[in-house]
Image: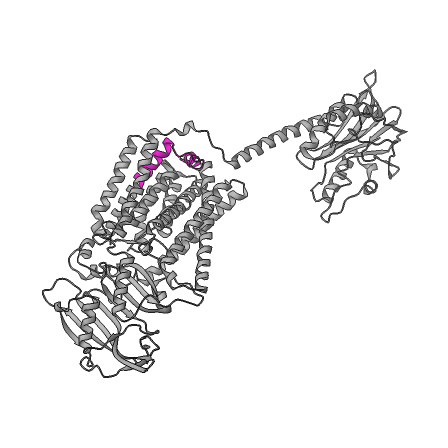
Amino acid sequence: MFNLRSYILLLIGLSGIGLFFLLRPQIDINSGGPVNQSKAEIGQTLDSVSNKLGFDTDSLAIFFVREQHPNYIKTLRDTLDEEFSFTELNQNDANIQSWLAVVGRKITEHTIVTGAQDVFNTTGLVQLRFDNNGRVIRFISSNDLPNPTFISADDSLMTSAAKIVEDIFEYDLMNYELIGADSLVNDPGQEVQSSSGELDPVSGANGEDKQTINISWVRKAGVESGPKNISIDLELVVKEYNMISGYRTELGYSLDNFTATDDTEPVELINGISESDEVDLFTYLFIFAVFILIIMVFGVGLHDIFKGQVEWKRALFMFIVLTLGVYGWRVFFYMNTFGNFLSGPSIWLSELNNFIFALVVGLYGAMAYIGWEAFARKQKQGQVELIDALWRRMFFIRETGAGLIHGVAIGGLAIGLFSLFTYLTGEFIIQNDSQFGYMEASIDQRLLTLNMSAWTTTWLVGFAQIGVVYGIVHHWIRKEWLRVSLSIILISFFITMIGRLIGTSGSAFEDMLIYLPLGILFYFTNRNYGLLSVITGWWFFAVFFMITPYINSPSIEIAYVSWVQMFLMAGPLIYGFISYRYGDSISEVSDYIPEYEERIAQHLRVEKEIEIARESQYKLMPLQPPKAEGIDVYGFFLPSFEVGGDYFDYVLSNDENGEPEAITMTVVDVSGKAMRAAMPAIFTSGLLLSRMREDCPADILRNVCEPIYSRTDKRTFITCVMAKYYINTGKFSVANAGHCRPILKRKGVSDFIQTPAPHYPLGLHPCVEYEPQVFKLKKGDLLLLYSDGLPEAVNQEGERFGFDEVPRMLDQIETESMTAQEIAQDIKRRVQKFSNYQLADDTTIICLKV
């Protein structure tokens, strides 16, 4: 809930933002140097320059990218004596960031491009670099493809070179003095190459033997503005025009190279950090982190899926939205950058690559959500009920408002900690909003793609790197100090390596030190508040640094991004206060029970009911066989499910002197299985038991026909065999209502006992006149009553045991030397072994030995 501590936390968060602006000149490469020119404005400058250089870009492909040059900054730190700020560097026009444009032909072969240099090496004709004010500072032509530039040689080479520098690239050579020129400067007729074209002038191919002329200037003493050194490389060429009247030639120059640099500025400005060892280390750690995190996320997610602990609608929503978000961002990105170079097969290959990548990320995000939610519910983490409310479209909740306010405060505190530790480690911040580097400035729909990138990454970081990691460690580790330490280390490591939308100039170790405070902060945020505040805080942190290049830009097309995004960033805070003040409390909202928990609860209820039915069914059957002189009886019931439709019983009746007189036995089999059969079996057992002591078998079956017929549904029928043995006289009476024929084993030979018709099962007709079969049992006789689960047992090959096999099996058993219990257990082992302990139906047996 929101209280005084919450206001203090919010104040600390706002102070964190203030700390960033205080330290910004020392840590932010964009301080004092926002993106001054949009891609469209740079494109207009490129069109003007290209037209003056003799070629038209309308029929060519162009790729723009905004680049930052931390290597140059490190060189400045190593060479300059005094301390400097990024504000000073940008205001003094140091080229620590620039626009790069590649002009070339479309790519027609099957290939996937991943960067500017890749494009230039493949089909690039020329490459231009513009400083933050939109002025050309580098120009490079391809070594492999024809140079498209052509400037007529109306004047001497020296004059033409000066015009290119002053009129096209807009540098005032009055502030420079010539320091070097090749020997051909005053002789434009030497070493001239010739090339032919059709109707329009096309530059001559740059061959291995081409000769270029270099001219260089240096800034005069006392002049403070402008680059220190200017250098230009020109090649003398002759253009041939194929006219109707014949060929026409024209002498001119092709521009091979142009550089405008300061003394410490490298000619080749590199995007990103170039120390190969450090890059390799970070790459190895990145791959390791991805591998471990994928194992954790998919391991936990699949485990929860197999256990049925999944909200499938939510998981599917996460999968679809994350897939569309990632794919949409990449579509916009390729459309605005590499897409100009793609055609035919390369387009389809790139789209397929983008779609597969998006599917993988979407699946990963869905698995992360599944894992987080299962852990959060088991561990009763905070704000789970708030996220449940959001899923149920209940947005106006007081606790949700408090969670959003806390999240914004945490985001501001994260900004301050990140800024402070970047400053303390002596590093600085660079933009790194995607796997391709800094790309948002190159996308025309940058406000949309910035938010697409921010929320997809925030969900992935929140649910996977923080939520799942927290849940796993707290599930497996019991010692408090160990799980706190391990959680912080793992969270810090994963957010350093994966999913961050802002980078630093530091090494992998220094980055870990910078992100360690953030790992601590978000661990305790998740522990004390919950994932809603974690996600809000990370989103606020990420978006804030993503808009820093646009703050205070003089270009409205650029600056509006920061204005609109700041308004969006204030949205959770404003909405949080409104919903906290006027919203309903979560306690007033009905509790949410996930579908899988309802299924589990229902399953537990069913299991409990089944267990009660099982206990009830077993209690209706005899626990111990009756003991009487002259008989040995034993029976068992073996259900194929938890409960079954079979039933057996034996009842000993006494004479008027209290001595055992007769034993009545019955085996019942209800059609169907499990609970459907168990309940009629229990009902039938009561009817039979009430008459078994007094009546004979045929009379009992006749008397129970009507109540069973009227009280059971028409699909249910019950088979029953009932027998009564009079101990003193040896008389044996048996009646059969559609059940398996009893077996009598006498003198080592087993055979079926035939009973008179009718044999209708109970429940088919309201009245059936059953007739008994009566004969005498002799000493040593063995009687077997059984249900059809015995002959219908099936082995692994699908073969049934068979009715005829039952008496043969009984013949194989040495029943003469065995008790009734031993005989029954032997039959039980045989049928279980035959069916590989997978009974097809309930099996019930009664053995009577006299």
Q: Quadrant of residue 518?
A: top left
Q: Residue furthest top?
A: 656
Tell me which residue sits at (44%, 58%) in the image.
Answer: 351
Residue 26 shows in the view = yes
- Point out residue 758 in the picture as x, y percentages from the top left corner: 86, 31
Q: Residue at 85%, 29% (x, y): give it.
A: 734
Quadrant for the N terminus in the image = top left
Residue 72, quarter of the rendered image: bottom left
The answer to whether residue 671 is above or below residue 156 is: above
Q: Residue furthest front?
A: 245
Residue drawn 46% across the image and 40% down it? 373
In the image, residue 223 above or below residue 579: below
Comparing 61 with 178, the one in front is: 61
Q: Nearer the viewer, residue 524 or 559?
A: 559
Give the x, y percent position of residue 674.
Answer: 68, 34
| Magenta part of the chain | 383-410
Left or right, residue 848 beside residue 72: right
Return the x and y of residue 637 as percentages of the image width and height: 72, 33
Q: Is residue 157 above or below residue 34?
A: below
Determine the main secondary structure of the stretch shown in magenta.
helix
Is 737 situated left or right of 59 in this image?
right
Taking the magenta stretch, the answer to whether it contains residue 330 is no
